[in-house]
């Protein structure tokens, strides 16, 4: 079963995303900030990452840069209230697969995760 890592400093967001995705049979791991997320990416090698941008310690951009520096190939879906055009462009340059505004709609998130996992199988 696919391993999904949710990196978000909001316990409510992590709880909501977990409840959206668990019925699809995914294994869910949670990280409370970017530093914790990077550690869990290395430890668990997830198949897809759901990433908030605005977090303490290391923000979402820092996580994306760390993925690139460590040459870790994993589809990332940014889930954030901060989807300004400049943020979106910066994320795309850092290799983000997709974006969702907070709070994401269940069906859209499930579809996006499925596409990300399918693309990950092809690479």
Image (cartoon, helix red, strand yellow):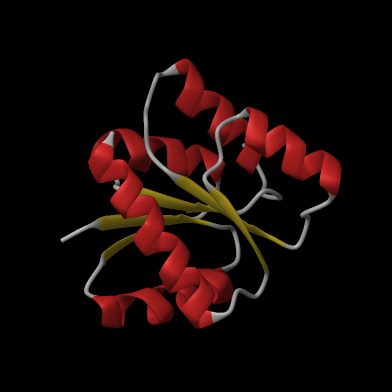
Question: Residue 113 is drawn in which quadrant?
Answer: bottom left
Image location of residue 51, percent across then percent down: 54, 51
- Identify the residue at the far left of this view: 1
Question: Residue 64 is drawn in which quadrant?
Answer: top right
- The residue lying at 42 percent from left, 72 percent from top is 110
Image location of residue 58, percent across then percent down: 62, 37
Name the residue nearer the viewer: 17 or 99: 99
Image location of residue 11, percent across then percent down: 54, 70
- The residue lying at 61 percent from left, 31 percent from top is 62
- The residue lying at 44 percent from left, 36 percent from top is 38
- The residue lying at 22 percent from left, 57 percent from top is 2
Is residue 6 shown above or below 106?
Answer: above
Residue 81 can be seen, yes or no = yes
Is residue 39 shown above or below 83?
Answer: above
> Is 119 situated left or right of 103 in this image?
left
Residue 45 can be seen, yes or no = no
Position of the C terminus by quadrant: top left
Image location of residue 40, percent across then percent down: 35, 42
Number of marks in picture: 0
Name the residue nearer the viewer: 123 or 30: 123
Position of the N terminus by quadrant: bottom left
> Is 49 situated left or right of 8 in this image?
left
């Amino acid at each position: 079963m696919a391993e999904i890592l949710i990196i978000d400093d909001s316990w409510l967001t992590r709880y909501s995303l977990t409840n959206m995705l668990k019925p699809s049979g995914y294994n869910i791991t949670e990280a409370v900030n970017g530093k914790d997320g990077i550690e869990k990416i290395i430890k668990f090698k997830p198949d897809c990452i759901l990433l908030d941008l605005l977090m303490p310690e290391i923000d979402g951009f820092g996580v994306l840069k760390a993925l690139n520096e460590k040459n870790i190939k994993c589809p990332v879906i940014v889930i954030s209230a901060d989807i300004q055009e400049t943020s979106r462009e910066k994320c795309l340059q850092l290799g983000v697969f997709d974006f969702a505004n907070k709070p994401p709609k269940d069906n859209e998130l499930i579809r996006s995760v499925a596409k990300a996992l399918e693309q990950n199988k092809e690479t």
